[in-house]
Image (cartoon, rainbow, N blue to C red):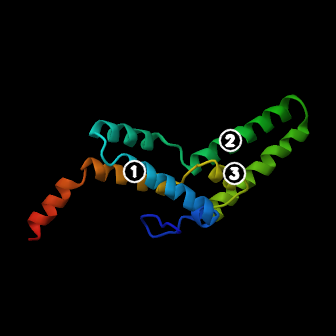
Amino acid sequence: MTMTTETGERDAVRANTTEDVNARLDREARQRVRSYERRPAADLSARIDELRREWDMERYLEMNAASIAGAGVLLGAIHDRRWLLVPGIVLPFLLMHATQGWCPPVPAFRRAGVRTRQEIDRELYAMKALRGDFQSEADAWNAAHP
């Protein structure tokens, strides 16, 4: 299943991920949500906080590219100019991801369980619904639309 963003754009990372990996990540998220169905609000709040702190694919890619490119520049300045090829390879990958939603590290990160912001948010909103965060909005809607 290809997810779309709030603006209706497709989730390019999911679209460029194999169906078995997407299915596994979705299944794991559903299992986590189900495991919280009868837990106290404090547990739900703790999980919501974890989800808010969870790194998404973009953050992993940015951190990975900056670290590798920075190391290449440093090694190129200190040891051998040939190390400057490293940022010359890594930075186009980052550009490729920004324009196409895919670059060579994406499949490895996905297999390791790195999720998109939309996937994380979907679990986050499910946890909020379990906690009852949207009940007052539903009550207000029902009262205004008998």
Dot 2 or dot 1: first in sequence order is 1
Q: Amino acid at mark 1?
A: Val
Mark 1 surroundings: few (<14), some (14-19) or many (≥20) residues within 10 A:
some
Query: Does the image show residue 136?
Result: yes
Q: Which residue is mark 3?
A: 108
Q: Nearer the viewer, mark 2 or mark 1?
A: 1
> Callout 2: helix, strand or loop?
helix
| Cα–Cα gap, marks 3 and 2 | 17 Å
Q: Amino acid at mark 2?
A: Ala
Q: Residue 6 sits in which quadrant?
A: bottom left
Q: Amino acid at mark 3?
A: Ala
Left of 25 or right of it: where is 92? right
Mark 3–mark 2 contact, CB under 8 Å? no
For the C terminus, the image quarter is: bottom left
Q: Which residue is mark 2?
A: 66
**Horizontal and vertical percent position of residue 61:** 64, 48
